[in-house]
Image (cartoon, rainbow, N blue to C red):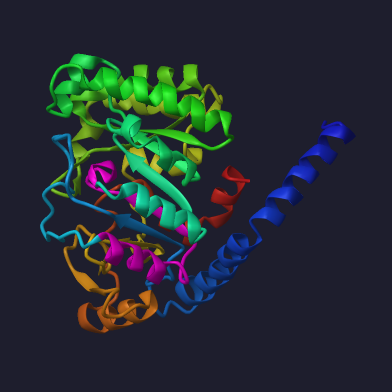
């Protein structure tokens, strides 16, 4: 039974969190109510209002991970000038307050510090996803973001150099940057996440990545690698993968380390359960301002923000042109896609996890 002091401390922490995040929480609950009525009850549409924007600032990358789908996308989007990119951020901000910067590799852009500075001045809550190799050349961006995500599939230098098709020493530099700047994020009370993409050749390396996260107090996040934008269901027949999944779930249940997602959400992600996808929850924007509808794997662009500045209008026109979001039964088990399912159908499961 909780002591009165503990209850009081938790209540104060909760009220402080609500006070600091009132606009975001208001939007979350307003959207949850809209989803409940229009998506689950009335069933007018599967198109939901964006809660966050995923901005692919470039397709260029300084690594060549064999499973990557973004370095050479089916629909190539050219980068625009720095000023146009900043204008794009200004178009996005009135519609969403959360920004996820990814690529390609964002840090290969010479103007990335200007981009993150503008995001800070616009008061975005910004998450930066990087491979970490160039962090030591762009330290200033860490003061512009609220959360840092670094990709790491193995701490075995030879193996990860092979996965990324990089010169010897690349993994050592990435690991050094992770430890150095992960400590800085932690010391400034901001989350630091290691994102691990699992495929058959790196299954046994994931245990070491998890231990690395535990030792340094990082958050561990994971999903399986896609092949041609599709889930690799054959992994379910791979005994070492099954043992790894059970280890991850057991570690989550026993709180051996911090792991992104609820236990049930991880079951969907790692055991490839069918789910209903609501991809517009995370508006996906390419470097030139193209907005995908409904998602990148289906290779259809709904519109461009420089031509139509409203996500709502882009999605409305795209729905008229392409139809509603198809029931694809979760053909790509990506973290964000499964989160969209939980957001609409199992909202309180997420609420318990992120309280």
**Does the magenta run of residues contain 15?**
no
Residue in the foreground of this view, choosing between 221 and 82: 82
Q: Height in image: 11 above or below 186?
A: below
Query: Picture quarter containing residue 296?
Result: bottom left
Q: Nearer the viewer, residue 344 or 61?
A: 61
Q: On the picture, is 286 further left or further right than 126?
A: left
Query: Quarter-wise, where is residue 293 in the image?
Result: bottom left
User: Where is residue 163 shown, x and y percent of the image?
Assistant: 17, 27
Q: How many marks?
A: 0
Measured along the vertical axis of the image, is residue 219 above or below residue 104? above
Q: Please state the horizontal and vertical placement of residue 315, each as a whole percent of the image.
A: 32, 76
Given the current orientation, which residue lies at the most extreme right position? 4
Q: Residue at x 22, y 46 (%)?
A: 104
Residue 196: percent from left, percent from top = 32, 32
Q: Residue at x 16, y 61 (%)?
A: 77
Please give left or right for residue 204 compared with residue 150 in the image.
left
Residue under the point 54% across and 30% down: 186
Q: Position of residue 25 (x, y in %)?
A: 61, 60
- Look at the image and tell me whether residue 190 can be seen: yes
Residue at x 18%, y 50% (from the top left corner): 59
Q: Relative to the observer, which residue lies in front, 203 or 98?
A: 98
Dividing the picture into quadrants, the one containing residue 270 is top left
Q: Is residue 174 above or below residue 22?
A: above
Quadrant holding the N terminus:
top right
Q: Which residues are magenta?
A: 82-109
């Amino acid at each position: 039974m909780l002591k009165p002091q503990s209850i009081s401390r938790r209540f104060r922490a909760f009220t402080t969190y609500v006070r600091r995040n009132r606009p975001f929480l208001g939007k979350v609950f307003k959207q949850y109510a809209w989803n409940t009525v229009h998506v689950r009850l009335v069933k007018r549409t599967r198109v939901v209002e964006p809660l966050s924007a995923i901005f692919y600032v470039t397709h260029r990358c300084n690594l060549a991970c064999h499973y990557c789908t973004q370095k050479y996308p089916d629909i190539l989007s050219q980068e625009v000038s720095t000023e146009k990119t900043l204008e794009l951020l200004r178009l996005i901000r009135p519609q969403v307050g959360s920004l996820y910067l990814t690529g390609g590799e964002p840090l290969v852009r010479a103007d990335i510090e200007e981009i993150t500075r503008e995001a800070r001045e616009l008061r975005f809550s910004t998450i930066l996803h990087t491979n970490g190799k160039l962090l030591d050349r762009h330290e200033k961006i860490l003061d512009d973001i609220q959360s840092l995500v670094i990709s790491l599939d193995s701490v075995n230098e030879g193996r990860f150099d092979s996965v990324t098709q990089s010169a010897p020493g690349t993994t050592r530099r990435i690991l050094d940057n992770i430890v150095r700047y992960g400590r800085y994020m932690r010391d400034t009370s901001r989350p630091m996440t290691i994102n691990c993409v699992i495929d058959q050749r790196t299954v046994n390396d994931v245990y070491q990545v998890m231990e690395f996260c535990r030792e340094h107090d990082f958050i561990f996040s994971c999903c399986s690698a896609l092949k041609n934008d599709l889930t690799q269901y054959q992994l379910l027949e791979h005994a070492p993968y099954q043992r790894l999944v059970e280890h991850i779930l057991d570690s989550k249940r026993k709180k051996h380390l911090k792991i992104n997602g609820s236990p049930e959400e991880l079951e969907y992600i790692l055991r490839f359960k069918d789910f209903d996808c609501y991809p517009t929850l995370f508006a996906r924007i390419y470097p030139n301002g193209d907005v995908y509808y409904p998602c990148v794997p289906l290779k259809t662009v709904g519109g461009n923000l420089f031509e139509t500045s409203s996500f709502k209008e882009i999605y409305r026109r795209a729905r008229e042109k392409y139809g509603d979001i198809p029931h694809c039964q979760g053909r790509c088990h990506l973290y964000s896609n499964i989160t969209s399912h939980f957001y609409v159908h199992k909202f309180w499961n997420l609420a318990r996890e992120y309280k």
